[in-house]
Amino acid sequence: MPALLVAVLIVVGAAVLAGYVLAARVDPASLGLTTESAAITVYLLGAMATLGYRELAVALAIVTAALLAYKQPLHGLVEKMSWDDIFAGLRLLIATFIVLPLLPSRSVDPWGALNPYSLWLLVLLISSLSLVGYVGSRWLGADRGIVLTGLTGGLVSSTAVTLSFARQSRDDSRTATAHTLACGMLLAWCIMFGRVIVEVLVVNRELVGRVLIPFAMMGAAAAVAAWVFFSRSAPARDRAAAKTEEVPLRNPFSLTEASKFGAFFAVVLLAVKFVQIRFPGEGLYMVAGLAGLTDVDAITLSMAEYARSGDAHVAVNAIVLATLTNTTVKCGMAVALGGAVLRRPVLIATGAILATGIGAISWL
């Protein structure tokens, strides 16, 4: 049977090659390898099914069909990618499949806080989440409008979206435009809330049920405020979308940035362990508040790990506190750097989010 399959493969390959040569003579400008590659792939999938690998063949066939169906959008995405983006993707693969297996999967400090393998794995998780948003942002293009920019940009950096929209509000003093920018900003914050839930789900599934309620409530408050501002911006919505500037999002994965986040994450882990030993309980809230001034991911992952052996209630409160602190910082950025018409909607929405988060903590 294997010899027959190889013989048929040679025949199929020869037929595909002959067709490619004829097409090159008739219309060289329209040459491509998609059809030829698909033909050989289909044969190989059939051979796999014949040899007994039916489930794998079906799965690969679905992936192949999806790639063929999205051929044009994928071409558009590739055209928008730079060499830096491609190299960043390769670095992510190197960090995942070469660096990660070399790291020791055990604690390397006297307090049992730092496990290099687990730490780097979580760094890759954060980088991958950001990379998904970055690819989506590049795919949609610069003319995607404020709303979609907020959604895709929020997965990469809600802070970058906040800063960009705040600066844009200075160039257009119309209230309707400010409402549209506030809507996009709040949607980026909504994505941040959802991202926290995903991070907890990956690290500690048992904690998700506790985290879901407060973050769903805060996300709902932000989403409702975004919808209200979006509905009020209807007269200028199309013009605002057309004039949206590109949010300066850099490719989220570089070994330098990943190492910086890894170092910050390690510091937070050590701080959590130190406070857990010296000032157990509410001392962690101070660490969460300080960490939330610059980043939510590190304290979220740290508290999710802490909840495995510590107080889950304290862990959830710390994550919510860090998120509220980070939201307040972004609100301050928008108020300080944005136009006067942007301040009121952002302050109102932030107040609603803070009230919801504090209420959720009190209720839980």
Image (spheres, grey):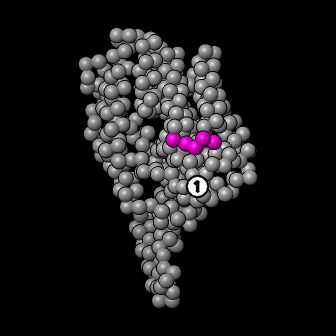
92 horizontally vs 42: left or right: left
Front-most of residues 96 and 5: 96
215 horizontally vs 120: left or right: right
Q: Please, what is the three-letter code of the amino acid marked with disc 1?
A: Thr
Magenta-drawn stretch contains 90 = no
Q: Residue at image x 44%, y 39%?
A: 126
The residue under label 1 is 244
Quick one: which residue is furthest to the bottom in this view?
Answer: 26
Q: How many marks?
A: 1
Q: Residue at image x 56%, y 25%?
A: 211
Front-most of residues 111 and 56: 111
**Residue 278 x/y as whole percent:** 34, 10
Residue 314 visible in the picture = yes
Q: Quadrant of residue 287?
A: top left
Front-most of residues 336 and 150: 336
* Vertical comparison of 360 with 343: above or below: above
Instruction: Say which quadrant the C terminus sits in.
Output: top right
Q: Quadrant of residue 271?
A: top left
Q: Residue at image x 44%, y 11%?
A: 281
Circle 1 SS class:
loop
For the record, the magenta segment spans 337-342
Instruction: Say which quadrant the N terminus sits in.
Output: bottom left
* Vertical comparison of 26 with 278: above or below: below
Residue 216 visible in the picture = no
**Residue 245 x/y as whole percent:** 54, 55
Q: What predominant SS class does the magenta segment belong to?
A: helix
Q: Residue at image x 52%, y 65%?
A: 76
**Residue 19 x/y as whole percent:** 49, 82
Magenta-drawn stretch contains 340 = yes
Residue count near mark 1 (Cα–Cα under 10 Å), binned few <14, some 14–19, many ≥20 = some
112 horizontally vs 307: left or right: left
